[in-house]
Each structure stands twice: as C-alpha cells, then as structure tokens.
Image (cartoon, helix red, strand yellow):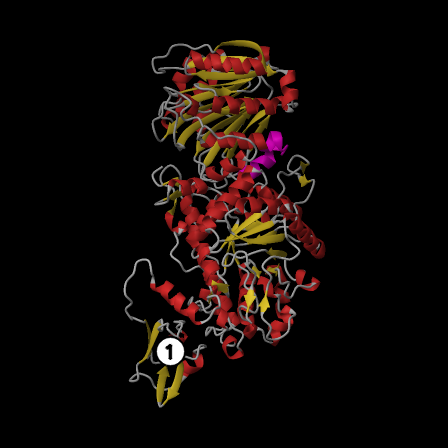
C-alpha cells in the first residue's frame, strides 16, 4: 500500500469521496490546440473545485518521443529518485530524462521533484517477463507505486501526459505551463475532496498507459470493483474511485478486447427490465455481458471523461446522478460537467445535448490511427 | 427408582374455567400431551412447547410455561449438561436432536453493521427507481469475446447454462421424508411463484412435483435415495450433497418411523427401514473422485449446472477451491448453524465453523486463485433475516439459502423434535393425520410473503447504500463495518472496524 511509503506526504488513508468539475474536448482531425483553451474552459467552473486538486491531460504533446512511454513522476526527495532510476534504467531503455518544466506560482506550494522519462522496455526484459510492452509497463507502474519509497508515477502513456497538483485549475495550469503544450485532446479536472489531504497523487486525471480519466462522483460499488480488478493483477493503491475506473477500462478494452461501446455497457449496465424487452439476440448478448461482468458494474453517481490515444469519451452512471453535457462543432467534440464550460470556449456550437444515463458519448479520431 | 431423572422442561396449564372441553387440544397435539378424564388433563413431561394447542384452543385456555424448578446454581455445570448426563446414564445411545445449533456461540452477523449514503453520494429510493435483485447461478467465463461493430454485436461463444433467480434467496435442501409432502409442495409452489428455487434434499422427488422442474434443484447424496435418471433431469440443476452444516462428516438420518408408503416409493427403499446415509459417498474418497461424479451427473443431464454442498469446516477455503477446479458450477456452503431433521447433538453443537467466516475465506481464496468466476457461492446455515442476507452477500455470497426460516414461516416453533416424526404443525412428520394440516397453498403463500418481505427490505438497504443492483453489493466488504469483533476475525472477514 501507498501509506507509509512517503516520509512527508500525507497520503490519503481512507478513500476520499469527492465532487468535481470536468471538461474535455477533442479535435477529431488531430489538429493541435493550445493548453490555454482547456484552462479557459475550466475557469467558469471554479465552484466545482475547492482548491484541493486539479489536473490536465493532453494527447499529442510529445510528437518527438511518440514511440516512447512518457513517464511523469513525482519524487519526495533525491534519494527516492536514485532508487527509482536504479530500477527503472535496468528495465527500460531511456531516451530522455528531464525535469518537467514549471513556473513558480504563489498558490502552488511545496511541490515535489517532478521529472519525466521517455523510455521503452528493454527487449531482453520483455522476453524474460513474457509480456508485451503495455502489460509490462502496467506492472512496472504498479511495482514502482507500491514499492519504491517516495516515488509516484502519475502518467505512463505514449505521446501524452498528465499534469496535476494540489490547487485550483488556473494555478495548476500556470505552474505546469500548460499553455505551452499543444494537444489534439485535452481533458481537465477541478477537485472538491471532502477532507483536506495535501497529496498531489490524489488529483485527477488518473492515468495508466494512454487511459486518462477525470471523474466526478463516488463509486458505491468500489469495494467489489477493487476486488474484481485485483483478480487481474491491478493494485488499487490510491484509494480513489477514479483509479478503479481507469483500470476497468484498461482491463475491458485493452486486455479483453471489448469494443468501447460494449465496455461502457459493462460499466453502466442496462437494466434487466430494458434487457427483457429487447429482441432475443440482444437479450442474450446483454444478459451474458451482465452475468460475466457483474463485478465490473460501476454503481453510484458518476460522470467521467476518458481520454485515450484514439479518442475521447464521456459516460454517466445508469441513472445519471452527476451532470454531463456534450457538444459538437466542426471537428471538435466537447464534453463537460456544465454547458457553460463548453460555451466558454465555443460560444455557438452546432449541436449541444445532455447525454442520457449510461449512454456514452464517443468521439474518435478520423481515419483511425 | 423412577425411570426418568429428567424433570419436565415445560409445564402445561389448562384453565378449567375457560376450557369448554372441545378436545381440540387432544387432536392437535402430535406428542400426546393431552388426555380427557372428565376434564382435559396434560402430561407436561411430553410437551415440547410447539404451541400447536395454544394456537388452536378456541378459549385461550392453555398456557405453557418454563418449568421454574430450581437447580442449584453452578457456573460450570450448566443444567443442560446435567440433563444430558441423566439421559445418557439412562440409555447408552447418543443424544439426538433436530434443527440448528442451539448453543450461544458468537454470532458474527450480529456484529456487522451496514453502511448508508449521506451527502457525498445520494441514496436511491427503491419505491421510485429500479432496484435489481436478479441473480444468475452457475459458471461464468473470465471474459467475453465480442464480434461485430457499430452497435451490432454478437458473442463468439455463448455463456454456459446459468440459473436465473429473481431474488438472491433460495430454499435449502430438506428431504421428503424428513419433512412432509405438503411441506415440499408448499416450497415448490412458492419457488415457482417467486422465480427462485427449492431443493429436494436427499430423499428424491415425489412425481407429483415434477411439473415444478424449472424451480427445483435435485439432490444426490451418499445414500442415493430416489436417484434415477428421470429424477436427475427433474430439475434445473443437480446438487451433490457432501455434507450439511448441522452434521458435518456424517450422513442423513431418517428414522424408519417416518418412512411410509409414499416416502418409501420416492426414496426407493422398503417401508419402515431406517434411511441412514453413509457418512461419505462411497464413490468419493478424494477430490478426483468428486470430479468424476460431477461429470457423470453433467453427462446424465445434458450439462446442467452441478452444485456441491459442503458443511463449513476448518479448511473450507482449500476444499472449495478444489471443488471449483473439479468442475462444480455452484458451491453451497452450509454453516455450523444449519438445521437438520436429526443429528447427534454433539455434532450439531460442536462441529464446523460459522457461515460468515466460511463465505469470506472461500470468496477470498477463489479470488486469489483467479477462479471466482468458475462458481457461484450460496451461503446457508444461519440466515435468519434479510439483514443476514445483505451481510452474507456483502461478504461474497451470490445468494443465500434458507431452511429453518422457511419452516418457521410454515408454523415451526423450533421445538427441535423433528426426528420424532410427531410434528404437530404437519411439517416434519409423515403421520397422515398431522401432514394433512399443512395446506400447501396456505404454506406457499406464507413463504412467498416472507421472501417478498425480505426482498423489499434488501432493496431498501441497497437504496440506502446508493446502489441499484445486487451485484454491486456482492463481495463489497467495504460497505460493512465490525462492532465488537477481534482484530483477527476482522482480518479474516476483511472488514474494517466501525469508525475506520
């Protein structure tokens, strides 16, 4: 577990429920958009956060290292960094390791050491482990996050990165110089946790590989979702609901190869009464889905926006207990907690709608990869 | 010397001013307590406090009290122990008893508290929103292979046979022979109306109940009573009964007194013979033998799910893992409080472990091994109320089974004399004048009411927990807290103490 791994950081000891503000958009033609736009969108949802956590994820920000896994890491101190590098360099071919550029901001205090490494698992390490690169990276992240003192990996995808801290979105964005990055997908988050931890790792987005999740809600089924994921080797160390959401999508889509739409129907399963009234093939399909993946049903209020390399999607719980709004304008699809956050950056979208409970809004890059 | 050293447990008192000598009590008492000599007389020594006479006396003239006879207090020589010794000094037989463990062991269910939502998470109103209890019992694949795209999806392989139940509560195995045909009828009718299951127990299935096959689990126990190929196919699943919570390690005991023509025909044994099941299945001396029987039964039934019922004993987690790997689709765990028609008191009261612990360790073990999806877990033996159902499911069970609670709904007063065959309520008896009193339709209605009432209570709790499907409770120990359990027990249950 994470608790006790850090000397000075007060890691959340119990699961912290939190309410939040979300915003995300994608240019499906892969045209890059500056980070100031997501900052602008988040600026109208200040009420939804309380300054105890905010973060961003951008896709397409590291074109020069697009074949390498971009590890964003927070270290408590130099000694953690040394231990980490010993382990990391043994397993990974590192193309570049550098400090994450930051700007001093009066409202962001006591930052950890923030580093990024562009790396790929060494061939001999992969063949010894008998894993593909993605699976290996998942294991490595889990191992570092549970075992290496004072060290926390908070981003591990390719050509993307997560930036998060304790603070309000505008301060966190300023600190990480978000305005200097360009991405085809941006997602942002403002957090309203219900206690007062000073733990940067607890902020959103939560990331594993190229999955980044921003989440508003409290997962009432957390206990069983966590135990289900443990069966597949995922260790829920962060004690946040969001972590469960990210691992579930990784499991269902990357490892079980479920189509994204189907994975959404696992996480926000249709009601039996609706299944019973559909045609027989659909009945059998959804019955099998619910039977097989009953422990992956995410129950309780949630709205999530998930970024991945090929697109972005938004999803609500099956009775829509958290707000979520969507819009489309030209090649850009927007999803946010509030319509205001969309209109702030796209005043007159061609289409605006409120997604129905459990119905995903999926936007994919045009022409696939 | 007097033959019986043991004083009467109860005193039967007839108020002769109120009694109008209708003799209904004489007819109603299965134990022959009452007689009539100018006025109604009662032999208190025969009374078991089953209340049949009290309920049916039109003048409320009968009262039954505990015998207030004083015994010299002794902290270590409880009166119960002294009485047992008097009985055993009188005859060399074992002390026989019925129903579940009566000793005041720690009740873990009563030390677990359920969570509810406040502020950060809205609770859900089950009167206004859907609340799903539907459960599927049987093996599930680890993952699904889905073909197709754009909303038009299909499965590469269908999911194997599963049994749908509309409430996560089934009726536990109680054999025809130990209970009456009318009791079996009531259970079958209720199971059908509730969309759930009854279990034949080990005494076969009366042909009259074959029409209820979609709601029946047929049992195959070590005595193989009433087992033939048509019977095996007269239900939705077959259960191999290895053991039961009330008497782990020993087989079923049905005294010859309870074996009349109909029971004899169903069980395929002579009238009046004691039906004593062997302690083990003589074709199962180890786990690989179990596998053979599981697959033999699957072959015989066109691959219906096979359940394996075991009593919860010390090493239950490893045993359950073996059962899952041997091919079972359902593991039925019967806790040490489970009921019985007849069991040696020593075994009933001192052997086995609580169902709460067993469910927790079995669920955890199967998850550790990554094989939880291979089996459904049914928890039984000590499920007394809807709260116990919620807690058992939160600890990891897919569904629960109720036996004693169902019998209490039919009138049972827990007198623990099932083995005598004298049940005044017409439940645990085969005497025609007694069995006739239990109207199966009346009984079924009471069972349906009971289960529906529990289902409503479970929905209320799910709503308070902020979930709207039973699967979000299953194995969700995060929503339980312990009050007054020791640290080791909490670790085993994987439940935090209240306040944490």
Q: Nearer the viewer, residue A333 or B451?
A: B451
Q: Is B328 situated above or below B342?
A: above
Please tell me in which quadrant of the rendered image residue A105 appears.
Answer: top left
Image x and y of residue B342, in percent: 50, 65
Q: Is residue B163 above or below residue B154?
A: below
- Chain of the residue under label 1: B
Q: Magenta: predominant secondary structure element? A: helix
**Picture coordinates of residue B239, whole percent (x, y):** 61, 56
Residue A148 in the image: above or below residue B395: above
Q: Residues within 10 Å of mark 1 (few under 14, many from 20)?
A: few
Vertical comparison of B418 with A119: above or below: below
Please report the residue visible at 42 percent of the width from the left and 49 percent of the height from the top: B461
* Residue matched to label 1: B2
Is B54 inside the magenta-drawn segment?
A: no
Q: Position of residue B51 (x, y in %)?
A: 39, 73
Q: Nearer the viewer, residue B128 or A101?
A: A101
What is the tally of numbered marks visible in this picture? 1
Q: Residue A295: in sight, yes or no? A: yes
Q: Give the side of residue A16 with respect to residue B231, left or right.
A: left
The residue segment tinted magenta is: A252-269
Q: Secondary structure at mark 1?
A: loop
| A267 in magenta | yes
**Residue at 51% over, 30% down:** A235
Residue furthest out toward the front? B1
Tell me residue B385's x, y (percent). Answer: 42, 56
Whether residue A178 can be seen here: no
| Quadrant of the image containing the C terminus of chain B | top left
Residue at the image point whose x is 65% and y is 16% from the top = A123
Q: In the shown orientation, is residue B97 left or right of residue B329? A: left
């Amino acid at each position: 577990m994470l608790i006790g791994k850090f000397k000075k950081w007060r890691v959340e000891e119990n699961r912290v429920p939190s309410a939040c503000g979300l915003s995300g958009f994608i240019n499906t033609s892969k045209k890059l958009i500056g980070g100031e736009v997501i900052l602008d969108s988040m600026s109208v949802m200040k009420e939804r956060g309380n300054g105890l956590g905010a973060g961003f994820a951008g896709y397409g920000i590291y074109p020069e290292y697009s074949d390498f896994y971009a590890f964003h890491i927070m270290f408590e101190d130099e000694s953690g960094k040394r231990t980490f590098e010993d382990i990391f360099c043994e397993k990974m071919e590192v193309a570049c390791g550098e400090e994450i550029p930051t700007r001093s901001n009066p409202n962001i205090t006591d930052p950890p050491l923030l580093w990024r490494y562009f790396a790929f698992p060494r061939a001999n390490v992969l063949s010894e482990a008998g894993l593909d690169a993605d699976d290996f990276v998942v294991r490595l992240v889990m191992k570092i996050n549970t075992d290496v003192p004072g060290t926390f990996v908070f981003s591990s995808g390719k050509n993307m990165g997560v930036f998060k801290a304790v603070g309000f979105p505008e301060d966190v964005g300023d600190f990480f110089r978000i305005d200097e990055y360009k991405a085809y997908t941006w997602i942002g988050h403002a957090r309203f946790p219900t206690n007062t931890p000073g733990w940067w790792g607890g902020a959103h987005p939560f990331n594993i590989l190229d999955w980044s999740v921003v989440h508003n809600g409290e997962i009432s089924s957390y206990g069983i979702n966590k135990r289900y994921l443990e069966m597949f080797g995922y260790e829920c160390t962060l004690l946040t609901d969001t972590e469960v959401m990210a691992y579930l999508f990784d499991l269902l889509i990357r490892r079980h190869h479920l189509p994204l739409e189907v994975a959404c129907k696992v996480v926000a399963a249709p009601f039996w009464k609706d299944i019973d009234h559909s045609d027989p093939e659909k009945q059998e399909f959804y019955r099998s889905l619910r039977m097989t993946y009953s422990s992956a049903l995410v129950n309780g209020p949630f709205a999530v926006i998930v970024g991945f390399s090929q697109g972005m999607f938004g999803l609500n719980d099956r009775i829509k207990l958290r707000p979520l709004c969507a819009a489309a304008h030209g090649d850009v699809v927007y999803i946010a907690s509030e319509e205001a956050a969309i209109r702030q950056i796209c005043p007159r979208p061609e289409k605006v709608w409120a997604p129905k409970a459990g119905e995903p809004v999926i936007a994919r890059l045009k022409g696939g990869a | 010397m007097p033959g019986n050293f043991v004083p009467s447990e109860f005193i039967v008192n007839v108020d002769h001013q109120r009694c109008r000598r209708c003799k209904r009590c004489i007819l109603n008492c299965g134990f022959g307590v009452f007689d009539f000599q100018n006025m109604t007389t009662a032999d208190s020594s025969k009374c078991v406090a089953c209340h049949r006479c009290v309920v049916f006396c039109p003048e409320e003239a009968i009262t039954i009290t505990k015998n207030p006879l004083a015994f010299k207090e002794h902290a270590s020589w409880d009166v119960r122990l002294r009485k047992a010794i008097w009985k055993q000094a009188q005859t060399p037989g074992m002390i026989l008893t019925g129903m579940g463990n009566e000793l005041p062991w720690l009740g873990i269910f009563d030390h677990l508290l359920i969570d509810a939502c406040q502020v950060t998470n809205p609770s859900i109103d089950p009167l206004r929103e859907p609340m799903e209890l539907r459960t599927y019992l049987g093996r599930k694949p680890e993952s699904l292979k889905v073909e197709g795209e754009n909303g038009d999806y299909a499965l590469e392989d269908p999911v194997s046979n599963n049994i749908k139940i509309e409430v996560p509560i089934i009726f536990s195995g109680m054999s025809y022979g130990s209970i009456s045909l009318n009791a079996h009828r009531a259970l079958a009718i209720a199971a059908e109306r509730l969309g759930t299951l009854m279990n034949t127990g080990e005494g076969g299935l009366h042909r009259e109940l074959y029409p209820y096959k979609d709601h029946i689990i047929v049992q195959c126990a070590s005595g193989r009573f009433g087992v033939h190929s048509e019977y095996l196919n007269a239900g939705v699943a077959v259960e191999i009964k290895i053991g039961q919570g009330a008497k782990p390690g020993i087989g079923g005991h049905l005294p010859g007194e309870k074996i009349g023509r109909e029971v004899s025909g169903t069980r395929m044994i002579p009238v009046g013979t004691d039906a004593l099941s062997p302690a083990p299945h003589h074709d199962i001396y180890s786990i690989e033998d179990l596998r053979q029987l599981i697959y033999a039964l699957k072959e015989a039934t066109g691959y219906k799910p096979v359940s394996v019922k075991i009593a919860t004993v010390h090493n239950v987690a490893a045993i359950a893992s073996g059962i899952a790997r041997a091919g079972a689709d359902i593991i039925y765990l019967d806790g040490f409080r489970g009921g019985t028609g007849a069991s040696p008191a020593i075994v009933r009261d001192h052997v086995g472990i609580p169902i709460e612990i067993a469910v927790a360790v079995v669920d955890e073990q199967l998850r550790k091994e990554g094989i939880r999806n291979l089996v459904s877990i049914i928890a039984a033996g000590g499920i007394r109320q809807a709260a116990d159902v919620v807690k058992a499911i939160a600890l990891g069970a897919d569904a629960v089974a109720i036996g004693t609670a169902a019998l209490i709904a039919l009138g049972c007063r827990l007198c623990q004399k099932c083995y005598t065959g004298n049940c005044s309520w017409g439940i645990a008896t085969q005497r025609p004048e007694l069995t006739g009193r239990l109207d199966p339709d009346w009984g079924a209605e009471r069972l349906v009411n009971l289960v529906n009432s529990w289902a409503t209570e479970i929905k209320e709790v799910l709503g308070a927990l902020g979930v709207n499907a039973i699967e979000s409770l299953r194995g969700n120990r995060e929503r339980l807290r312990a009050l007054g359990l020791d640290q080791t027990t909490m670790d085993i249950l994987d439940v935090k103490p209240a306040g944490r």
